[in-house]
Amino acid sequence: MIYTSTILYALGKMRGHVDAVADFKHWANQTDADWSAADGPPVIGHAAARVFHRLRHLDDLDTRIDVGGTCLSKARCRALHGALYSKADVWVSVDDDVEADTECLESMLTVARATRGVCIAPCLTRRFDRDMVNVFSLGPGEALHDVPSLRVLWGGFGLVAIHREAFELVARNSDRWQDDDREWKPAAFLDILSQHGAWLDDDKAFFFRLPRSVRVSALLVGRTTHAGRELNCGDIMTMDRFDTPGARSTVPL
């Protein structure tokens, strides 16, 4: 089983909580033919809905759709809390403007389960002055269970698959905070100011708390789209990444 979560703040703000959730569930349950026939400009939430839709063909899903969270770190912590109490062996977190093809999603699940670690589907960042991929790599590419991948130190949380063993370790390494529902939850995405003066926001903070013994991989197969920008994941070895000298986001943790 896969625990799948997304954060739809923009859609919730436009449509209201009830209608936003209803819209998203309707999109996620559409058939392939419905999606093929869809026309018109991009709609907020469609990208993540297509990820949910494709994942349904790969495994049973338990889902969390957050349309009210205004603090990204808290929203991601709430999703982690839900994953901990689910029966899923893998948690897939996808942002509302990120999409991936079936090959990418299936490969991501394969690597996360095989390594019992984290697998990132790389995406282009929102920078428009240069093409930048959202991973900090550690070495050359390799094949894990016939899936081409790259070992990385950390990466963006636009589309990530995390094995239960990995997210349970992060939860144990995190302080607890008391949410509005009075439940205590792991603050795994709480921002950190590092000893080097670097601001580690939600995704970097998660990887900072992840033990180094846990493998973090980035796919070198499939295609992703972030904010309308498409990436062939196999091209990332020749592109600027967070570890590229001079990159704005060169934070080694």
Image: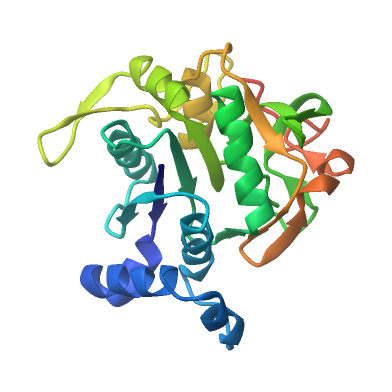
Q: Is residue 101 left or right of residue 64?
A: right
Q: Is residue 127 left or right of residue 196?
A: right
| Residue located at (46% from left, 67% from top) | 45
* Rendered position, 159 above or below 153: below
Where's the C terminus, which quadrant? Answer: top right
Q: For residue 97, what is the image quadrant?
A: bottom right
Furthest residue in direction right, as rendered: 238
Residue 166 in the image: state x and y as whole percent. 47, 23
Residue 157 in the image: state x and y as whole percent. 54, 42
Q: Is any part of residue 5 visible from this angle?
A: yes
* Rendered position, 19 above or below 3: below
| Residue located at (23% from left, 67% from top) | 17
Q: Nearer the viewer, residue 253 or 95?
A: 95
How is this picture coloured? Answer: rainbow
Q: Nearer the viewer, residue 178 or 230?
A: 230
Q: For residue 28, what is the image quadrant?
A: bottom left
| Residue located at (55% from left, 25% from top) | 117
Where's the N terminus, which quadrant? Answer: top left
Q: For residue 180, what is the image quadrant?
A: top left
Q: Is residue 182 left or right of residue 93?
A: left
Residue 67 in the image: state x and y as whole percent. 30, 60
Q: Is any part of residue 155 visible from this angle?
A: no
| Residue located at (26% from left, 33% from top) | 85
